[in-house]
Image (spheres, rainbow, N blue to C red):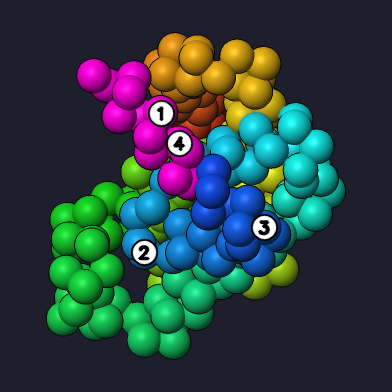
Amino acid sequence: MFVEFFGEVFKLILNFVQIFGYIGIFIMTFIESTFIPVPSELTLIPAGFLIAKGELHLAPVLISSLAGTLLGSLLNYFMAYHFGRKLFINYGKYFFLKSDQLLSLELFFNKYGAISTFFGRMLPGIKHFISFPAGLARMDLKLFVLYTILGSFIWLSFILYLGHIISTNEELISIYIKRFNIVIIFVVIFIAILLYAKGNFKNKNK
């Protein structure tokens, strides 16, 4: 049942990417990088699939998806930068962001600094919102852009590669998705260990 449902969803998104091409990829990654929690996998796995089939090309897909991700992240950054915490206190529900979630994000950012923008782009549940604490902290814009591009490049490349792998056997889509989720869990654990070690190192050197 799940396999059939996922297969139909995959076909629908595949048709969307085929019809709108690179512009569609840009739009979807832009939306995904704002406060609207749309997973980038929905668009980029089919995009990787079409790259493997020769219907799209890797460089334009990466450029359009990176551009969409960066512009969506900048939108979040500048909203937080110019309107401050009051925006989220008064209208947080419209950003799908509760006050305690914003506080957790700020603590995460304040503890690990600017590098959290890099890691945050690869963490499910955080990558949509990591630009908000960066804007509230008035993080250096050039550094924000650099870390956003680097973190997004790793994440997007991985998703596209997953779509490329899936293209070899369309019947195994659901299996690869499950494996992908397992990989993400290990990536999150690995990054958490690195951040924890960095935090301890900072505390010992105070």
Q: Circle 3 sits on which residue? A: 21
Give the residues drawn in magenta, as a range.
Answer: 1-13
* Residue type marked 3: Gly
* Residue type marked 2: Phe
Q: Circle 1 sits on which residue? A: 7
Q: Can residue 70 be seen from the camera position used here?
A: no
Q: Residues within 10 Å of mark 3 (few under 14, many from 20)?
A: some
Q: Nearer the viewer, mark 2 or mark 3?
A: 3
Quote the CA–CA distance across marks 2 and 3.
23 Å
* Residue type marked 1: Gly
- The residue nearer to you, when weighing 158 against 8, is 8
Quarter of the view holding residue 34: bottom left
Q: Secondary structure at mark 1?
A: helix
Quote the CA–CA distance across marks 3 and 4.
15 Å
Proximity of marks 1 and 3: CB atoms separated by less than 8 Å = no
Q: Can residue 71 be seen from the camera position used here?
A: yes
Q: Circle 2 sits on which residue? A: 35
Q: Circle 4 sits on which residue? A: 10
Instruction: Say whether disc 2 or disc 3 marks the residue closer to the N-terminus.
Output: 3
Quote the CA–CA distance across marks 1 and 2.
27 Å
Q: Secondary structure at mark 3?
A: helix
Instruction: Say whether disc 1 or disc 3 marks the residue closer to the N-terminus.
Output: 1
Q: Secondary structure at mark 2?
A: loop
Q: Position of residue 9 (x, y in %)?
A: 38, 38
Quote the CA–CA distance across marks 4 and 2.
23 Å
